[in-house]
Image (spheres, helix red, strand yellow):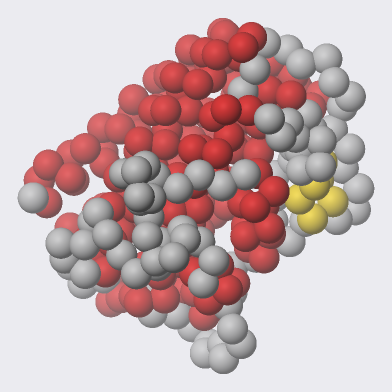
Amino acid sequence: MAENLEPTPVDETENRINTPFNRRNFLKYTGVAMAATAVVLTTSCDDDDEDDMVVTDDSVNLGSGDVGILNYAYALEQLEAAFYTAVVALPNFNTLFPNATERASLTDIRNHEIAHREFFKKAITAAAASQIIPSLTPNLPASALASRESILATAKTFEDLGVAAYNGAGKLISAAGVAYLGIAGKIVSVEARHAAEIRDMISNGTFASGAAGVTAGNIVDENGLDVALTPMQVLALAQPFVKEKLNGSNLPTQ
């Protein structure tokens, strides 16, 4: 992998956001469970009668209402899936991660993120096919994939951002779409376990702490709650990793 001396989006984002058998098997089986619950969301998804998605040459409008929130989650899951797919496909993956348990964990996380991506794709297509956003083009700097350290740092950024995004979007789901809330809770708990697993890989025993949290070096606030970010905050942090311009201006704000 060619060396890239340019600051990575991870650098900027990190400044702003913040027993192997059991973990291994949890990561394996949670992905299966998420795929199964796609049926639940698909059948409960309420068609949103807002305008169709507007996609220009380099801009993707996420839309509005509950479908907009689903597109928002779909965009983030696309990003995470693309990243872990690229990691596992690295020709030197085994060299960067000589520990078989770590390779298996990253592969499991990749599978989860793909399952999440496909879950939202299926649900939005079933409920509002004309409003689903297209496949996004990831913008992953070579430096993010250049070493074990940079891969794990990027993974931590994505997982922390994902947890904060789901936590912040839950309150934006309408009463009519309350079924989504339970599904979102299931997804965010998986994302949080991903974050814990990645932290443990970076420094054993730090799964519930870390110096690169969402705000002020913490991932949990003074009330013992995970940090939540608004969609606009999240999109600003995710944008450097996506080539298309993400437009969340029509998403609900309260």
Q: Quadrant of residue 168?
A: top right
Position of residue 14 relative to residue 42, above or below, is below
Give percent across and percent down for residue 88.
39, 60
Which residue shows up at 68% across the image and 23% down it?
66
Give percent across and percent down for residue 149.
35, 77
From the viewer's perspective, is 159 left or right of 248?
A: left
Which residue shows up at 52% across the image and 90% down it?
3
Give percent across and percent down for residue 135.
69, 44
From the viewer's perspective, is 134 left or right of 33?
A: right
Residue at the farthest front position: 222
**Residue 78 visible:** no
Position of residue 222 relative to residue 131, above or below, is below
Pick the residue in front: 137 or 192: 192
Which residue shows up at 87% across the image and 27% down it?
52
**Residue 48 visible:** yes
Q: Quadrant of residue 13?
A: bottom right
Which residue shows up at 62% across the image and 44% down it?
230
Pick the residue in front: 220 or 140: 220
Position of residue 34 relative to residue 159, above or below, is above
Give percent across and percent down for residue 113.
45, 43
Quadrant of the snapshot with the C terminus: top right
Query: How many marks can you see?
Result: 0
